[in-house]
Image (spheres, rainbow, N blue to C red):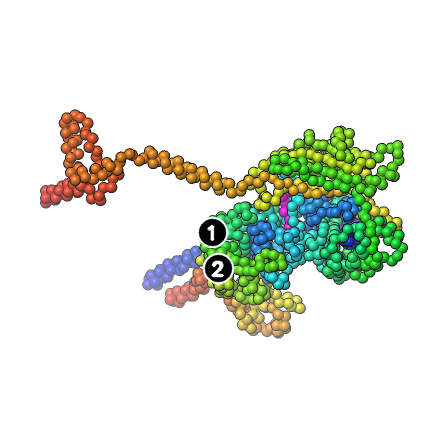
Amino acid sequence: MLAASAEEEFSEELLLKPLPDRKILAHFHFRNEAPLAADSFARHHHLFPKSISQLVQKFHIKAMELSFTQGRWNYERWGGFDPISSHNAKPPGVELWAVFDVPQHQVDASWKNLTHSLSGLFCASINFLESSTSYSAPEWAFQSALGSLRYGTLPREAVCTENLTPWLKLLPCRDKAGLSSLMDRPSIYRSFYHSQRLHLIMPTAVSDGSKSGIILEQTLTVVLQPNNQKASMNHVGETKIQPSWSLSSIFGRKISGRCVLAKLSNIYLHFERGLVTQLDNLQKKSSKFAANDTGLTWKHPVVWSSSHAPLYASRFLMGSGNERGAIAISLKSTEMTKGLVSANNVEERCKLQVNVLQIVPWYVKVYYHTLQLLVDERPQVLADFVERMRVSPSEDKVSPGVMELVLQFPCEMKSAVLSIEFDKGFLHIDEYPPDANQGFDIPSAIISFPDFHAGLQFCEKSQSKSPLLSKLQERSPVLSYTEVLLVPLTTPDFSMPYNVITITCTVFALYFGSLLNVLRRRVGEEERLLKNKDAKKAVFLRRMLNKLSAKLRGRPSESTPSPPSSSSSPFVSPKLILRVLMVAGIAVAWQYYSQ
Amino acid sequence: MGLSVSMLPMKVVLLMLLIFLCYSVAYSSSSSETTMHTNNWAVLVCTSRFWFNYRHMANTLSLYRTVKRLGIPDERIILMLADDMACNARNKYPAQVFNNENHRLNLYGDNVEVDYRGYEVTVENFLRVLTGRHETAVPRSKRLLSDEGSHILLYMTGHGGDEFLKFQDSEELQSHDLADAVKQMKEKCRFKELLIMVDTCQASTLFSQFHSPGVLAIGSSMKGENSYSHHLDSDVGVSVVDRFTFYTLAFFERLNMYDNASLSSLFNSYNPNLLMSTAYYRMDLYQRHLEEVPVTNFFGSVMKTIYTDSAYRSWSNKKIRAAKSKMPLDQSIFDSDGRVLRKSDEEDQFNNLTAEDYIRDSVGQIWSAILSNVNTFESTDTFVCYGLVLMLPLLIFSTWLSSK
């Protein structure tokens, strides 16, 4: 249980660790602490960033972690058992989990508002996590014991300078002084793996359990390759001298001075246990450490390997086609498990507990009854190995599918594969992203080993004041993240709406056009028109005569057709002339008689 | 009796004058010319996705850099980038974006804040930013919080055509939608003046439907013309900048924050032969003359400060000093959003003021107040209004004299 002190404190530390495959791990650790007096609601902060304290107060956050990562942590080469890989090896993209201190029915609203605020604060599209299809509430993972936890990831989010800029502005010295002035952007973004993380904790006071402060931890983990060996990628087996490096050679910058606001500003160089034993074996001076511009020069080739997690976890897709497929999680034993077996007592059965959390979006419709387990390539009954299982099936366009498993494996197992089948769903045409042909992502699964605790042990206890070292000594379960899977879904032809409209309009035009033609046009009309033109001269009088004779005779008039009114009559028709003459005559008569 | 008869038309005239004055004062207070220019905003939008549209990102980032260099802070810039080029896996120079083959300038720099990224750059979000109609949860940094005194620069680049602009290869923004959004903005008093700059093919068709006052627009090409990229960078592998933006930048790189270059010099600097298209601008909705508008009214945020060591003196003394030394109280002081602090070495002469000086000072104070009011006029009818106010006492005096 961490306790906050009575005033604000800031400390900055950098840990450098050579990795077996000729790379260097640089881990920046900034810790900012602010006390929260119970009787004051408002507070002036002079080291702690105001935006974070406002966020905590507004959304009643108990704990939160936000990470921006690019690259994949190579568990085989860089280790899986040490605290840095357990805490700082994160899935690519954005990962956010938060525990809230509000009643159950308000947690989703708080989560939604939190994602929007974070997206404005860190220049990322974290607001996409607001929709219920992208977040979930796992119960047995993370720190769900604290309360209502919500978890979401965006695997495809890009991470670049615009995410680092506001993150650095939360530090008291920004990127102007101290260790953060080392962060040369091109060097960081050229690295094999970089992850910036923000972790907020509200520790409770030991005495009464009330909140005693806020602790903000910001870490940046970068795996770099020194410049002089950029081109070659060597196997670990080849005995070549490790590249020599210094801070200015890997970052291109020098530290100008410490941050004066920091209580503690240290640089540590971490040699792993495997490396130390190798160095001892050589019994020669195989490396030289420079203090001013911190660096390391290797004189003799050394080969070592990092400590691994109990099982390698990896995940892949099976099947082909756009209709269905299967997801498989494979767990392989490492040297560590072999060590477990050999160290074990013969009478007791050595058991290895593995927790699996997998969240799958709704359009990958998983069939949970098809969950199969193969141990050492032989199919097994699931109930023999699964201790507990919690499944929250997905709902179309509402929530993703969550599966949490607690498995118990025998330590002598060589490999295990968990596979589950799925059908690919259909999305509405508006729901496709602009680059739909790339495919859709299934976020990383989380494999944890609760029996083991990743924590370093130091011989001397005097370093306990350093926050980084105390963090490294903390006992926390070993975590591994699997790969993100890319699922190609069927994409529609996005030009189809245009095609449909065009063809429908054409069909309508043809249909109604021909219908109108059929109804309106008469057969033989043109011949009749021609005939009428000849008979036009005495047409009016003839018609009158016909009508008169018909009336006298009491018979219907003959079939002499009257000229249709729509025929092209001349501008001045005879009828009109007669009428005009009649009116003129009446007018003359009137004039004559009125005078 | 003769007096009363002659007084009658005078009284009528006075009454009419008073009514006219009240009306004109009321009218002038509601006209927009009297709102002061308070701040500058910039909305920079890149609408293209995918690596081969690198140049559109470089265009937008070049404008971003210019606008930041000339003074607009990140809080007043809304930057919308539809894809990530700097940290793209295809970028040989991570975290670096160049707009020139010589790679002299890294546009991405160390302090970049992108407000709308990736899939968030949609027509809906763009129109929400312009009209200010967001959901309640949207944070302040993603909102255009301009007021009635703001000058807004809106720059859009990407692929476009006749009366539309393509967003991310999946939707379009039409010219009448944009005109409607700008009309909404004007109704809600969200800007005083708006400059729209568009760098796409057939760009000038995008603002053909505007009818709101206070809008100035320039496009890189006319209807039927394409806008071309400037050059290809064989190292990065794609074209890195468009011609229109390249020449715009060439104009701005010569400027610093205090230069007085006018908009007309910017608009006249475009050579159709070099651009391979005609840069067409539309000023029929804009009242001011382009020669009098400095480019920093839109592209920068100018605050002139003069450093002074000693304590700040009261404002009235400063005005007297101004009136005495005949310093020009012209628009370089009053039109920019600046406050001017006078030099401190002129203050030593204030200490020896006598009684006559005080009377002269008060007259000078009134005179300088009048002068300052005169110089903030931006239209003639307010001038006429004030002239009439001045004439009124003269009229009363003359009637009194004539009645004697």
Q: Quadrant of the C terminus of chain B?
A: bottom left
Frontmost residue, A459 versus A147: A459
Q: Main secondary structure of the magenta part?
A: helix
Residue identified by numbered label 1? B162
* Residue that lies at the very extreme toward the top in this rendered image: A554
Q: Residue at x 57, y 66 (%)?
A: B254
Q: Chain of mark 2?
A: B
Q: Amino acid at mark 2?
A: Ser
Q: Is residue A128 magenta?
A: yes
Q: Quadrant of the N terminus of chain B?
A: bottom left
Q: Residue at x 54, y 46 (%)?
A: B170
Q: Amino acid at mark 1?
A: Asp
Please give left or right for residue A238 compared with residue B55 in the image: right
SS label for mark 1: loop
The dot on residue B277 is 2
What segment is highlighted magenta in the picture? A123-130
Frontmost residue, A240 versus A311: A240
- Which one is earlier in the sequence, the residue at label 2 or at label 1? 1
Please give left or right for residue A166 compared with residue A291 in the image: left
Q: Residue at x 58, y 53 (%)?
A: B52
Q: Position of residue A181 (x, y in %)?
A: 73, 58
Q: Answer yes or no: is residue B230 visible.
A: yes
Q: Residue at x 75, y 44 (%)?
A: A202
SS label for mark 2: loop
Q: Position of residue B184 (x, y in %)?
A: 50, 49
Q: Position of residue A55 (x, y in %)?
A: 68, 46
Give the CA distance from mark 2 to mark 1: 15 Å
Q: Chain of mark 1?
A: B
The dot on residue A337 is none
Quarter of the rendering containing residue B72: bottom right
